[in-house]
Amino acid sequence: MGNYDEMSTARLTWVVLDRLVPSDDEAAARAALIARDPELAIGVATGAVSEDEAIETLRRRQGGYRPAGDAAAVRMLAVLVAVLLVLAVLAAALVH
């Protein structure tokens, strides 16, 4: 990824909240995102909130934003299996 200062706030928010940042670069990306919100930046700097709490605050502000978790992965897998089953049935129907 690299230079987070040149990234738009929307893109940086997406990259950080969706955890698309390489693990060795995660701290820099999170810090860059927090720095763009003066209230959170002051809170983190003074120790009133942790960096994790600041990121969670940003996540809540996204209005319905939910990071992909185990439940989302299971739903996606179920949809994929269902699609594959439908395709298998259609392929079998075409062969016969």
Image (cartoon, rainbow, N blue to C red):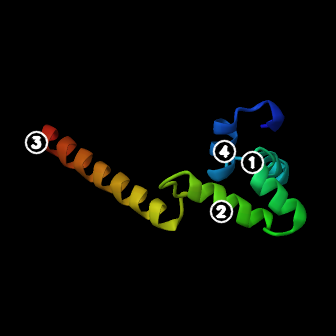
Q: Most extreme residue toward the right, as rendered?
A: 46
Q: Which structural element holds mark 1? A: loop
Amino acid on which disc 4 is placed? Thr
Q: Which badge, 2 or 3, comes first in the chain's sequence?
A: 2
Q: Of discs 3 and 1, which sits in the foreground?
A: 1
Q: Is residue 28 left or right of residue 9?
A: right
Marks 3 and 1 close (CB-CB < 8 Å):
no
Q: Which residue is mark 2?
A: 56
Q: Which residue is mark 4?
A: 13
Quadrant in the picture for the N terminus: top right
Q: Which residue is mark 1?
A: 37
Question: Which mark, residue 96?
Answer: 3
Q: Which badge, 3 or 4, comes first in the chain's sequence?
A: 4
Q: Is residue 21 left or right of residue 96?
A: right
Amino acid on which disc 1 is placed? Asp
Marks 2 and 4 close (CB-CB < 8 Å):
no
Q: Which badge, 3 or 1, comes first in the chain's sequence?
A: 1
- Please report the residue visible at 69 percent of the width from the left and 37 percent of the height from the top: 9
Residue 93: % across, % down: 13, 43
Q: Which badge, 1 or 2, comes first in the chain's sequence?
A: 1
Figure check: 56 above or below 15: below
Q: Which structural element holds mark 4? A: helix
Q: Residues within 10 Å of mark 3 (few under 14, many from 20)?
A: few
